[in-house]
Amino acid sequence: MKNKAAQSKTWKTVQIARHPDRPQFLDYVGDIFTEFDALHGDRVFGDDGAMVGGLARFEGQPVMVIGQHRGRSTREKLQHNFGMSNPEGYRKSQRLLHMAERFGLPVFTFIDTMGAYPGVGAEERGQAQAIAASLAQLSSLRVPVVATVLGEGGSGGALGIGVADRVIMLSHSIYSVISPEGCASILWKTAEKAEQASEALALTADKLMELGVIEHVVDEGEGAHLHPEQVMNQLKIVLKQVLDELQPMSAEERCEARYQRLMKFGSNNSGLMS
């Protein structure tokens, strides 16, 4: 096992990302945005509580806000399905993204999920297709798209609202193709190796910044649950900075830059992205 100190630091980050008192999506909406008006339903099956979205104002400007909310109390967690979206959640986000493009509204998405809900019903209603359609829609959306990882960013459930012009992470959030426990269960046949797996996954903000997967890291000190207002204020500053960079660009320029950003993933020089 190499660099045990580094592994311990990474595992600590995983634990902070999952802290029960960590601010959640609706906390950030209430602090950063004004006049938030939630919209419901996918117009096909029903409303998904894990995916919350609607119209709001950011610095006085109309925007579309979409994010995953996990809930705190048992009742709220059940209402929001622990932040794990069903296909109707992704179809709801698609409906809101279409509305944003129609009216020229910038889009802010906020990621905080263990992953998409893996139940039989979700699969029967087209979970994989719904996520794939969301990826395709976001990759070609003509309005600015800014994604922020607030806590956990797990697998396709996170990517379903994660394709963006810029991706921001809080310094104690995580973003990965699989959970450390899931990775350990596959590689070592035991979830007890989760700490070792967390290091191998390079799921922390600093490592993903080096790889060029994200563009900005918001410092949250020892954790956003300790100083939530300070972290929210810092995130608001970064969101404003990023939006000011993206809005002067034409739709064609943004789409081309977004395409080039995605095409650099996995290339030898992906870590050199600004």
Image (spheres, rainbow, N blue to C red):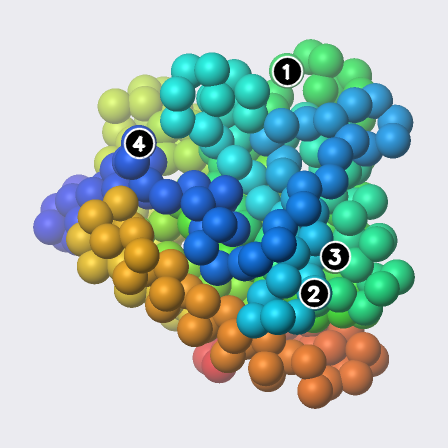
Q: Is residue 167 left or right of residue 200?
A: right
Q: Which element type, helix, strand or loop, lies under badge 1?
A: loop
Question: CA gap, disc 3 to disc 4?
Answer: 30 Å
Q: Which element type, helix, strand or loop, lies under badge 4?
A: loop
Q: Which amino acid type corresponds to the residue marked 2 in the rendered image?
A: Pro
Residue 248 to residue 205: above or below: below
Q: Residue at x 55, y 25 (%)?
A: 80
Question: Foreground mark, 3 or 4?
Answer: 4
* Quarter-of-image position of residue 188: top left
Name the residue beneath numbered marker 4: 20
Name the residue beneath numbered marker 2: 62
* Quarter-of-image position of residue 170: bottom left
Question: Foreground mark, 2 or 3?
Answer: 2
Q: Residue at x 85, y 64 (%)?
A: 103
Residue 119 circle label = 1
Q: Is residue 270 left or right of residue 1?
A: right
Q: At which x and y percent is residue 187?
A: 39, 30
First-in-chain label (2 vs 3): 2
Name the residue beneath numbered marker 3: 138
Q: Which residue extends farthest front? A: 35
Q: Which amino acid type corresponds to the residue marked 1 in the rendered image?
A: Gly
Residue 109 circle label = none
First-in-chain label (2 vs 4): 4
First-in-chain label (3 vs 4): 4
Q: Nearer the viewer, residue 75 or 11?
A: 75
Q: Which amino acid type corresponds to the residue marked 3 in the rendered image?
A: Leu
* Quarter-of-image position of residue 265: bottom right
First-in-chain label (4 vs 1): 4
Question: CA gap, disc 3 to disc 1?
Answer: 25 Å
Question: CA gap, disc 2 to disc 4?
Answer: 31 Å
